[in-house]
Image (tube, grey):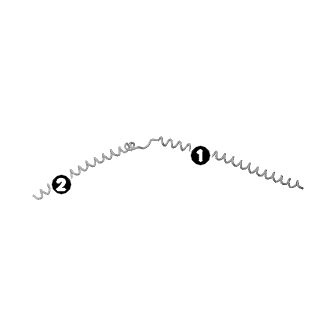
Amino acid sequence: MAQEPKKTQAIWERHMQTILTFIITALIAWVGTSVSTQRAEIAVLQHSVNGLQHEVENFTKMPRFTQKDFDAEIRIYRATDDAHDQWLKRQDGRIDNLTGRIRKLEDAEMRRESN
């Protein structure tokens, strides 16, 4: 009879060892799967980072719109604006000339009527 409890205890120990072995095996499998998944995700992220680095490099190589470029672009508009200003000054001169002539005619008409 003394051997019966030892035999039962040995059976329980084997069952516990089997369960622990199963748990450890499951954990190792889970860690392996997680590492594999993480490796794939890291590869995707690395690809994205490389693409972004490439875009940044291309962006920094692109020419900038500088003050010199702005001056070159605006030169046409400034020339047109200057031409319009000159045209307006000529028109103002003509208006002043016509106004002066009209005054002279009016003054001459008034003198003739008063005589």
Residue 112 percent coordinates (x, y): 12, 56
User: Which amino acid, by three-letter code, is at mark 2?
Assistant: Arg
**Crowding near pointer 2: few (<14 within 10 Å), some, many (20+)?**
few
Q: Residue at x 45, y 41 (%)?
A: 63
Near-viewer residue (92 or 78): 78
Q: Is residue 25 left or right of residue 101?
A: right
Q: Is residue 65 left or right of residue 114?
A: right
Q: Say which residue label 2 marks.
A: 103
Q: Give the farthest residue toward the front.
A: 2
Q: Residue at x 53, y 43 (%)?
A: 53
Residue 104 percent coordinates (x, y): 16, 53
Q: Residue at x 83, y 54 (%)?
A: 9
Of helix, strand and loop, which one carries label 1? helix
Q: Say which residue label 1 marks.
A: 45
Which part of the image, by quadrant, shows the C terminus?
Answer: bottom left
Of helix, strand and loop, which one carries label 2? helix
